[in-house]
Amino acid sequence: MPKKTSSSRRVLVTGGAGFIGSHTVDQLLAENVDVLVVDNLATGRIENLDAACTSPSFRFEQIDVTHSGTLSRILEAFQPHAIIHLAALVSVQESIENPALNFKRNVLATQTIIDAAQRGMVENIVFASSAAIYGDNPELPLQESAKKQPLSPYGGAKLASEALLLAAANTYKLKVTANRYFNVYGPRQDPKSPYSGVMSIFLDRFAQGVAPIVFGDGQQTRDFINVQDVARMNVLATKSNQSGFNAVNVCTGKSTSLLDILDELRLHFPDAPETVFKEARTGDIIHSLGCPNSARELLDFTASISLREGLAQYLQSTTRSSALLR
Ligand SMILES: NC(=O)c1ccc[n+]([C@@H]2O[C@H](COP(=O)([O-])OP(=O)(O)OC[C@H]3O[C@@H](n4cnc5c(N)ncnc54)[C@H](O)[C@@H]3O)[C@@H](O)[C@H]2O)c1
């Protein structure tokens, strides 16, 4: 267990070996926070925590967050001031095929975290929610108050978790920030995963000299946010003084089409093969865009990394680690 000092802040990160989690851990450690990661390594990778493992303020426990007894014992020993709850079943497709597992990992897990938090000295809970709770909603840019119409058990579970956290904030006087991430991209996103972000899949194909595949005409748009910005927002939220429950979009407010991304990537891979267009997939959302104002007003958060800069950094890091060239 990282050594406790009276002045050090302690943060528990569930799912800390994953894509967003590991960047969040790196930023917490850079702020001299004591960090404990719990992760069952279902989709996360211990290599994502290579840098963190060199810090004396870091500790890792391979456990499932739904194991309430083990989690409670760990929390009692560590006494975190804040919990960043990122552990989840992250595949929309898997949530459709196995809704019971989705319920366990995405709803029951949230309740387990709440139960453990309210028994300890936790002040802030930061929850990884998702733009998936809005579904295919034409009221763009999406405000937090927009109608919630999730299109999958995954989106439904994120919404249900928000409801449980709202009740917990009111019942136990916890401060809760539900960060509704839009499309997150950046290093350590696994392109081999069947549910990975489009950015890592395109990048992987370009790096291998294989044609990128676009379903539909490529005019569909997303609000892409760099993982470093997302991690910064997670860290900010652990220090929030806002009382009760607050849900905020974590987005840039900028719309980018798949064709725009391909154009940007072709600057780095001028000899890449032509794009292959296939029939649009049923159920795909055409446009998604968030309104970033609440995050700025409540937590002084504005995404600072442009897509061009973020992609260039992403490319640099992948050529260094050659993770995309396996
Ligand atoms: N990546 C995105 O664009 C995006 C968008 C919206 C929301 N989110 C949410 O952000 C969070 C992090 O996502 P990510 O993209 O980093 O995915 P990820 O798969 O890289 O990270 C999830 C981590 O949780 C761990 N985990 C899963 N179930 C667990 C359990 N029961 N007990 C302990 N650990 C468990 C996995 O091993 C993994 O390390 C998730 O809650 C996801 O739903 C991500």
Image: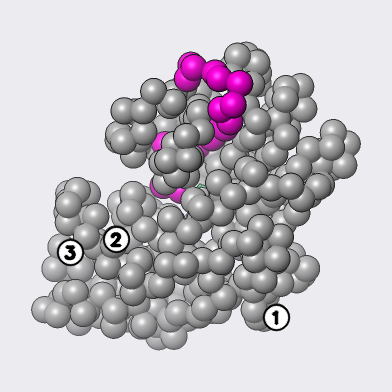
Residue under label 3: 207
Mark 3 and mark 1 in contact (Cβ < 8 Å)? Answer: no
Residue 153, percent from left and from top: 64, 52
Decide: few, some or many residues near mark 1? Use Cα within 10 Å; few <14, some 14-19, many ≥20.
few
Kind of residue at disc 1: Glu
As drawn, the residue found furthest toward the front would be 7
Picture quadrant of residue 249: bottom right
Between the residue at mark 3 and the residue at mark 2, the CA separation in whole angstroms equals 12 Å
Left or right, residue 247 beside residue 250: right
Residue under label 1: 139
Earlier along the polypeptide chain: callout 3 or callout 2? 3
Secondary structure state at the residue bearing disc 3: helix
Residue 214 showing in the rendered view: no
Say which mark, if any, is on residue 314.
2
Q: Nearer the viewer, residue 320 or 10?
A: 10
Specify whether residue 196 is painted magenta.
no
Earlier along the polypeptide chain: callout 1 or callout 3? 1
Decide: few, some or many residues near mark 3? Use Cα within 10 Å; few <14, some 14-19, many ≥20.
some
Kind of residue at disc 2: Tyr
Residue at 51% in and 66% down: 303
Residue at 63% in and 48% down: 237
Between the residue at mark 1 and the residue at mark 2, the CA separation in whole angstroms equals 31 Å
In the rendered structure, which segment of residues is drawn in magenta? Answer: 1-22
Give the foreground label among 1 and 2. Answer: 2
Residue at 65% in and 30% down: 81
